[in-house]
Image (tube, rainbow, N blue to C red):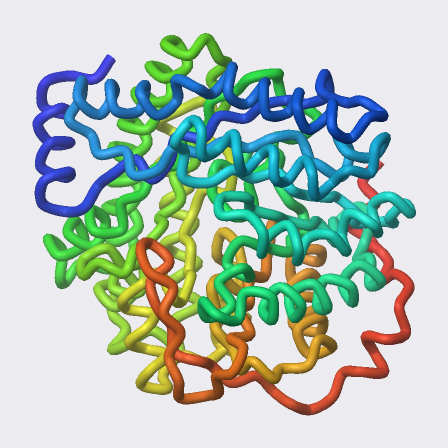
């Protein structure tokens, strides 16, 4: 039970420090929609999404009014479409049905135009992967992800190479909007099946038919809590973050359980990731600076982020038996005012961000790079990030945006929660021969756990 003091403290966190429920995401299984007739499959996908998730937005608004908790996004994730469309091959038709359903029910995004090819890909999955640029450029709300690596399987370098090409083609097809299509595409290592955040959400094959996963966000709350101990040592810093994460997670669990009951769905998980926004006071970078860095990107940034991520997880796990998703700290450049400022000043580079991904929740996220970046360089960045995930047995991801027609020093503007980003340079030393070799990078020895 949540007592009166916790309620009043939650009200203060909402009013003064940008605490919100970043998303209620309904996961839906679509196996019952499979048909060898593409039109029929797409029709059944549309019908199921509208039928099962039609009340999601109204439920979010009802809960927000009940508890006074802002709920920013309502989303749906579905079974990877590479599986659902395999019999018919009608991937693009299904993507458009997903988009139409999302518009009909009023949600913000729908995820699951996805594939898991960490060890290999079938001919149908290759066809699916090649459909991603057109799917993203011809729809508004559809998000896509590809899992190219896992600690158990290693890295599928053929898929890594193809994903670099997918990013480039998507950038070109959405060139009139600063290549924003790439913001809806993420490449994973060790993808999780219950992630409520876009663009990487999908409802995994091990999930129930209808699940509610909630993503909570409170960077401003954590920063404010740390301001109360300006001279505390790092043990005090960690304890303060843990206590704050506990309170934030309790709010998320309340919302998740209520939504599940109203919608007749299973309660899945609470993801307590600190997901920033461009709004001042809602920045992960500013938390790290409150811990003691002059600016993010300084030496010590990775250590400070490791402390933050660990303390968030520990606090959340004590608050809920069903913490899942990614849970920790996100470091998207375009969505975090502090990260944007550090990148613009030159304090934060892609190399430093890569080091930070070894200890954060996800990876290289929402980073705008020059539009003429070769596909092989993008693939090499994906390979590096996948290697960090595979070796460290953690989820990592890449969401790069090569902004067509722009170069280092320019700014890409995406709008809304996606914010804006300075164009950051990548090394132009060629990885072409390495990427074109193809094949697989074997799993690390500690991946063999049986």
Q: Is residue 224 left or right of residue 112?
A: left
Q: Which residue shows up at 67% across the image and 35% down it?
A: 94
Q: Nearer the viewer, residue 257 or 5?
A: 257
Residue 105: % across, % down: 42, 26
- The reply to whether residue 300 is in sight is no
Who is closer to the viewer here, 74 or 206?
74
Query: Is 90 on the left or on the right of 403, as rendered?
Result: right
Can you say which quadrant of the picture contains the N terminus?
top left
Q: How many marks?
A: 0
**Residue 141 in the image, given as x and y percentages of width and height:** 49, 44
Regarding residue 324, the answer to whether it shows in the image is yes
Where residue 231 sits, quadrant-wise, is bottom left
Q: Is residue 255 above or below residue 358?
A: above
Closest to the observer, 181 or 236: 181
The residue that appears at 64% across and 50% down in the rendered structure is 135
Where's residue 68, x and y in %?
Answer: 15, 26
Q: Which image quadrant is residue 27 in? A: top right
In which quarter of the view is residue 438 placed? bottom right
Seen in the image, is 400 located left or right of residue 315? right
Residue drawn 55% across and 48% down?
Answer: 139
Residue at 40%, 61% (x, y): give it: 305
Is the residue 94 above or below the residue 184 in the image? above
Residue 439 percent coordinates (x, y): 91, 63
């Amino acid at each position: 039970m949540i007592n009166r003091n916790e309620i009043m403290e939650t009200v203060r966190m909402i009013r003064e420090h940008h605490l919100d429920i970043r998303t209620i995401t309904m996961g839906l299984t679509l196996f019952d929609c499979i048909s060898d007739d593409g039109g029929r499959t797409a029709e059944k996908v549309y019908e199921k999404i509208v039928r099962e998730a039609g009340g999601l937005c109204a439920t979010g608004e009802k809960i927000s009014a009940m508890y006074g908790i802002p709920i920013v996004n309502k989303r749906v994730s579905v079974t990877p479409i590479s599986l659902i469309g395999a019999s018919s091959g009608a991937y693009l038709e299904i993507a458009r049905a997903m988009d139409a359903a999302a518009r009909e029910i009023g949600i913000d995004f729908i995820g699951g135009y996805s594939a898991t090819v960490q060890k290999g890909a079938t001919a149908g999955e290759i066809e699916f992967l090649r459909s991603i640029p057109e799917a993203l450029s011809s729809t508004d709300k559809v998000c896509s992800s590809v899992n190219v690596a896992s600690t158990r399987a290693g890295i599928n370098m053929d898929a890594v190479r193809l994903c670099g090409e997918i990013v480039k083609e998507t950038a070109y097809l959405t060139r009139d909007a600063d290549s924003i299509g790439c913001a809806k595409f993420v490449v994973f290592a060790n993808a999780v099946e219950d992630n409520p955040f876009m663009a990487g959400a999908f409802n995994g094959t091990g999930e129930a038919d209808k699940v509610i996963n909630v993503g909570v966000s409170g960077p401003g709350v954590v920063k404010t809590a740390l301001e109360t101990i300006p001279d505390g040592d790092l043990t005090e810093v960690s304890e303060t973050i843990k206590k704050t994460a506990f309170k934030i997670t309790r709010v998320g669990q309340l919302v998740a359980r209520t939504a599940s009951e109203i919608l007749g769905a299973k309660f899945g998980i609470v993801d307590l990731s600190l997901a920033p926004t461009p709004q001042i006071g809602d920045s992960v970078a500013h938390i790290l600076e409150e811990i003691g860095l002059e600016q993010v990107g300084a030496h010590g940034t990775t250590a400070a982020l490791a402390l933050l991520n660990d303390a968030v997880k520990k606090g959340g796990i004590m608050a809920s038996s069903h913490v899942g998703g990614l849970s920790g700290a996100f470091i998207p450049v375009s969505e975090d005012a502090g990260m944007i400022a550090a990148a613009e000043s030159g304090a934060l580079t892609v190399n430093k961000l890569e080091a930070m991904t070894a200890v954060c929740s996800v990876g290289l996220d929402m980073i705008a790079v020059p539009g003429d970046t070769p596909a092989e360089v993008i693939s090499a960045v994906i390979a590096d990030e996948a290697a960090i995930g595979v070796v460290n047995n953690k989820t990592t991801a890449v969401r790069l945006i090569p902004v067509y027609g722009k170069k280092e020093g320019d700014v890409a503007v995406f709008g809304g929660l996606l914010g804006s980003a300075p164009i950051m340079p990548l090394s132009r030393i060629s990885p072409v021969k390495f990427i074109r070799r193809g094949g697989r990078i074997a799993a690390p020895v500690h991946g063999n756990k049986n």
